[in-house]
Amino acid sequence: IMTICPALCLEDGDEARHLFGLNASSIAAHFSVYFDTIPAYAEKLKNEPRPISQRRLRELIARAAQDPDLKGPIARGAPTREFLYQNGICVGSPKDVIETMKRFQSVGIDQLVTIPVVGFNTPHAKTLESIRVMGEKVLPALRAKN
């Protein structure tokens, strides 16, 4: 069973949570346009000629971003350790991320696709650092012992 979750893993968990907090709400507009297989989003895009051009996609995302009622795929709340853990958001220190990922394992999820927390408020160097830290500290802790 596979699922997806956002991930930002830094040695400094407080920094990761801060960066996530700056970007957490920005994904809803993108999600509502690109994931048009979800019925509520598909209904809004049903009259758009296909394929949708990149220019039009950007317009649709900008319009969606102005919708105060738009719901995104990620729970909204203060980016505390507890909130992120309870909502399956893999953001924080390696220890925090491992604990959250083990929750997925405990319910039978055997494939977890992580989506890097990126956005205008996340420096590219921090995204790359997160990928490195995940590879060095998180993945080895989750590999099955043979």
Image: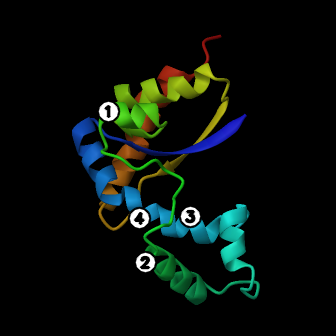
Which type of secondary structure does the marked residue at label 3 adopt? helix
Mark 1 neighbour class, 10 Å CA radius: few under 14, some 14 to 19, many 20 or more? some
First in sequence: mark 4 vs mark 3:
4
Spatial CA span between label 2 and label 3 = 14 Å
The residue where tag 1 is placed is 81
Of the residues shown, which amino acid type is indicated by label 2?
Answer: Gln
Mark drawn on residue 66: 2
Instruction: Evaluate if marks 4 and 3 touch, with contact meaning CB atoms under 8 Å apart.
Output: no
Residue 23 visible: yes
If you read the primary sequence from the N terminus, does the residue marked by circle 1 or circle 4 appear first? 4
Q: Which mark is residue 31?
A: 3
Instruction: Answer with mark 3 or mark 1, whichever residue precedes in sequence.
Output: 3
Q: Type of residue at label 4? A: Ser
Q: Residue at x 73, y 63 (%)?
A: 37
The span from disc 4 to disc 3 (Cα, nearest Å) is: 9 Å
Which of marks 2 and 1 precedes in the sequence? 2
Residue 84: where, in percent of width, then height?
A: 39, 37
Q: How far apart, in angstroms, are the residues tagged by discs 2 and 4?
A: 11 Å
Q: Which mark is residue 26?
A: 4
Left or right: where 56 falls relative to 89: right
Q: Secondary structure at mark 2?
A: loop
In the rendered structure, which disc, 2 or 3, sits on the residue that comes first in sequence?
3
Q: Residue furthest top?
A: 146
Q: In the rendering, at what x and y percent does residue 64 appear?
A: 50, 76
Quadrant of residue 34 in the image?
bottom right
| Whole-percent x, y for residue 81 in the image | 32, 33
Q: Is residue 69 left or right of residue 56?
A: left
Closest to the camera, between mark 2 and mark 3, is 2
- 10 Å neighbourhood of mark 3: few (<14), some, or many (≥20)? some
| C-alpha gap between disc 1 and disc 2 | 29 Å
Name the residue nearer the viewer: 23 or 41: 41
